[in-house]
Image (cartoon, rainbow, N blue to C red):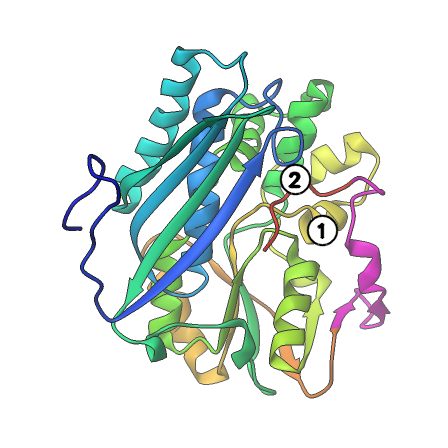
C-alpha cells in the first residue's frame, strides 16, 4: 500500500498477480439484525470476502468497504460494525484502505477484497480438477447451518452443552477465512479449489461443471461439526442435510493428486486444521453422493434445507 484513505482513491503497488473479489451482504437476505449483532455483521462481511481469496490460494492484501445505512442504524452500531471488520483485518493481515458511505433502505455492506500471488500460475481455480484426483475438505461441516437454526430457534439448544451451542452460533456469525490453508493447499499441488458458501454439494457441483469432470463423494466421510447432529435431531431434519447443504461454513473443498494428499494434510495439521478425504474425481459430469451401501443418493435433494432458502451469499 502506498496511500490509503484520505485522498480520492487509494494507491497500491501491485506485485505478481492480483486476485479481486466483490462480495455483498444485504439485511434480510444474508443476515438479520434481530439475530446478528453489529460486530458480527462486520466480521462476517469481511471474512466472507476474504474466503474467496483463500479459495484461490492467494495471500490477503487490501479491502474496500461500501456501507449503506438505513436511518435506524446508530453511530454506535456503525462503530461496532467497523470493530468487527477491524478485528478480521488484523487477524488476517489485511489493510482496509477505504470505501464509501451512503444512505440505504436497509443495511448493506459491499466488500471488495484484493489478494496477491507471485504469479497467475500460483493460483488455484475451479477448473483444474482431473480424473484420478482425490476430493477433500478442510475442517468440519454443518456448524454454520446449525448455528443459524439456534439463532432463529433458541429452544433447539436445549440439551446442548453451552460451549458447543456457542461454537455453532459463532460458526454462523463469525466465520474464519482459511487463508493460510488455501496457500498451503495451493503449494501442495491443489488442482481445483472453492470455498463452501453454498453447501458441500452445491459447491462441488461448481467444481465439477468448471472442470468438466464427475465428483464422487462418500456421504459417510463427511466431517461433521460437534453439536450438528443434536441440532438436526431437535429440528427434525437429517444431520447430513445440515452438513451437505447448509452452506456458509467457509471451509475449502479441494481436489489434489493422490500423491499430494499426505503432504497437504500434514501442512494443515501443523495449524490444527484437519483435511478429510471425501471421494475422488472421475471422468463424466455432475456430482454423485454415495450412501452407506455404496448406492447413489440424489444430490439434488441436498440443495436446500427442507425447502428453506440458503442465506449464503452468491459464490
Q: Are marks 1 and 2 in contact (CB under 8 Å)?
A: yes
Task: Identify residue for label 1.
Answer: 245
For the point 85% across and 43% down, the residue is 307
- Quadrant of residue 281 within the rendered picture: bottom right
With 156 as the anchor, is 76 left or right in this view?
left
Residue 243 at what x, y percent from top left?
67, 49
Circle 1: element type? helix
For the point 61% across and 51% down, the residue is 314
The numbered dot on residue 145 is 2
In the image, 144 versus 54, the foreground residue is 54
Q: Residue furthest front?
A: 8
**Magenta stretch: includes residue 169:** no
Residue 41 at what x, y percent from top left?
49, 29
For the point 55% across and 50% down, the residue is 140
Q: Residue furthest left?
A: 2
Tell me if mark 2 has few (under 14), some (14-19) or many (20+) residues whose alpha carbon lies within 10 angstroms of its own: many
Circle 2: element type? helix
Tell me if mark 1 has few (under 14), some (14-19) or many (20+) residues whose alpha carbon lies within 10 angstroms of its own: many
**Magenta stretch: includes residue 288:** yes
Residue 180 at what x, y percent from top left?
33, 57
State which region is magenta: 287-308
Amino acid at each position: 500500500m502506498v496511500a490509503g484513505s484520505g485522498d480520492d482513491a487509494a494507491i497500491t503497488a501491485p506485485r505478481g498477480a492480483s486476485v479481486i473479489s466483490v462480495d455483498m451482504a444485504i439485511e434480510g437476505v444474508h443476515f438479520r439484525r434481530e439475530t446478528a449483532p453489529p460486530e458480527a455483521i462486520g466480521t462476517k462481511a469481511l471474512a466472507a470476502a476474504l474466503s474467496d481469496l483463500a479459495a484461490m490460494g492467494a495471500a490477503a492484501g487490501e479491502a474496500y468497504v461500501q456501507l449503506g445505512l438505513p436511518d435506524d442504524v446508530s453511530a454506535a452500531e456503525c462503530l461496532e460494525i467497523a470493530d468487527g471488520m477491524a478485528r478480521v483485518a488484523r487477524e488476517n493481515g489485511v489493510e482496509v484502505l477505504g470505501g464509501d458511505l451512503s444512505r440505504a433502505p436497509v443495511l448493506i455492506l459491499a466488500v471488495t477484497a484484493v489478494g496477491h500471488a507471485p504469479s497467475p500460475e500460483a493460483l488455484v481455480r475451479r477448473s483444474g480438477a482431473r480424473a484420478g484426483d482425490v476430493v477433500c475438505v478442510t475442517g468440519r461441516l454443518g456448524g454454520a447451518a446449525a448455528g443459524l437454526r439456534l439463532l432463529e430457534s433458541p429452544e433447539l439448544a436445549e440439551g446442548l452443552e453451552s460451549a458447543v451451542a456457542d461454537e455453532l452460533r459463532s460458526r454462523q456469525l463469525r466465520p474464519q477465512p482459511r487463508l493460510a490453508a488455501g496457500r498451503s493447499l495451493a503449494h501442495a499441488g491443489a488442482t481445483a479449489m472453492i470455498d463452501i458458501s453454498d453447501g458441500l454439494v452445491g459447491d462441488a457441483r461448481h467444481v465439477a461443471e468448471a472442470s468438466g469432470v464427475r465428483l464422487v463423494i462418500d456421504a459417510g466421510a463427511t466431517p461433521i461439526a460437534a453439536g450438528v447432529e443434536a441440532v438436526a435431531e431437535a429440528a427434525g431434519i437429517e444431520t447430513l442435510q445440515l452438513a451437505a447443504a447448509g452452506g456458509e461454513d467457509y471451509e475449502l473443498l479441494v481436489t489434489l493428486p493422490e500423491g499430494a494428499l499426505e503432504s497437504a494434510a500434514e501442512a494443515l495439521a501443523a495449524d490444527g486444521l484437519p483435511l478429510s478425504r471425501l471421494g475422488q474425481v472421475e471422468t463424466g459430469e455432475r456430482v454423485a453422493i454415495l450412501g452407506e451401501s455404496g448406492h447413489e443418493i440424489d444430490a439434488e435433494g441436498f440443495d436446500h434445507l427442507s425447502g428453506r432458502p440458503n442465506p449464503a451469499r452468491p459464490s
